[in-house]
Image: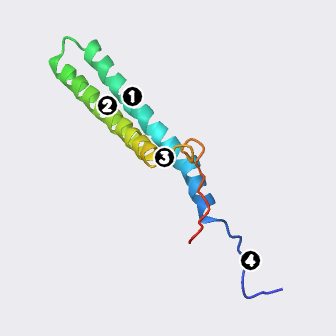
Amino acid sequence: MNFLFTNVAYAGVDSFIVNVNREIINPLILLLFALALIYFLYGMFEFIGNSTNDEKKTIGKSHMLWGIIGLTIMMGVWTILNIILNTLNIQDQINPQEGTVKLNDYNPK
């Protein structure tokens, strides 16, 4: 027994990245997408519900605009990610929903 050093359990970096992607990043992206959609819908209801008040209609338009901007940015990120995956022909090797990456073995010549 070695009392001077503590025992440390080592995990692979790739398993850590996979778990962070699966447990934190993907749910966070879905949450932000849902929030942008809710923000847009809130602006739409505010615009329709306050058709007589011009100030509240302007605020509703602003909420709808920023909701659309948020949705557009997130759809753009997913589109760029898919273009990169298809261009590099690795769409079958990376699964963002599960957080898995399959890499070919490295065989130097």
Task: Say whether disc 2 or disc 4 marks the residue closer to the N-terminus.
Answer: 4
Q: Decide: marks 2, 4 in contact (CB < 8 A)? A: no
Nearer the camera: disc 2 or disc 3: 3
Q: Decide: marks 2, 1 in contact (CB < 8 A)? A: yes
Q: Residue at x 43, y 41 (%)?
A: 82
Circle 3 residue: 89
Nearer the camera: disc 3 or disc 4: 3
Residue 64: x %, y % from top left: 28, 26
Looking at numbered disc 3 in the image, what kind of residue is underneath it?
Answer: Asn
What secondary structure is found at the residue carrying circle 1?
helix
Residue 2: x %, y % from top left: 79, 87
Residue 7's disc number: 4
Nearer the camera: disc 1 or disc 3: 3
Q: CA distance from mark 1 to mark 3?
A: 32 Å
Q: Decide: marks 2, 3 in contact (CB < 8 A)? A: no
Q: CA distance from mark 1 to mark 4?
A: 48 Å
Looking at numbered disc 2 in the image, what kind of residue is underneath it?
Answer: Gly
For this rendering, which residue is in front, 22 or 88?
88
Residue 37's disc number: 1
Circle 2 residue: 67
Which residue is most to the right? Answer: 1
For the N terminus, the image quarter is bottom right
What secondary structure is found at the residue carrying circle 2?
helix
Task: Say whether disc 2 or disc 1 marks the residue closer to the N-terminus.
Answer: 1
Q: Residue at x 35, y 33 (%)?
A: 71
For this rendering, which residue is in front, 17 or 105?
105
Looking at numbered disc 1 in the image, what kind of residue is underneath it?
Answer: Leu
Q: CA distance from mark 2 to mark 1?
A: 6 Å
Q: Residue at x 52, y 42 (%)?
A: 27
Label 3 CA crowd tier, 10 Å (few <14, some 14–19, many 20+): few
Task: Say whether disc 2 or disc 3 marks the residue closer to the N-terminus.
Answer: 2
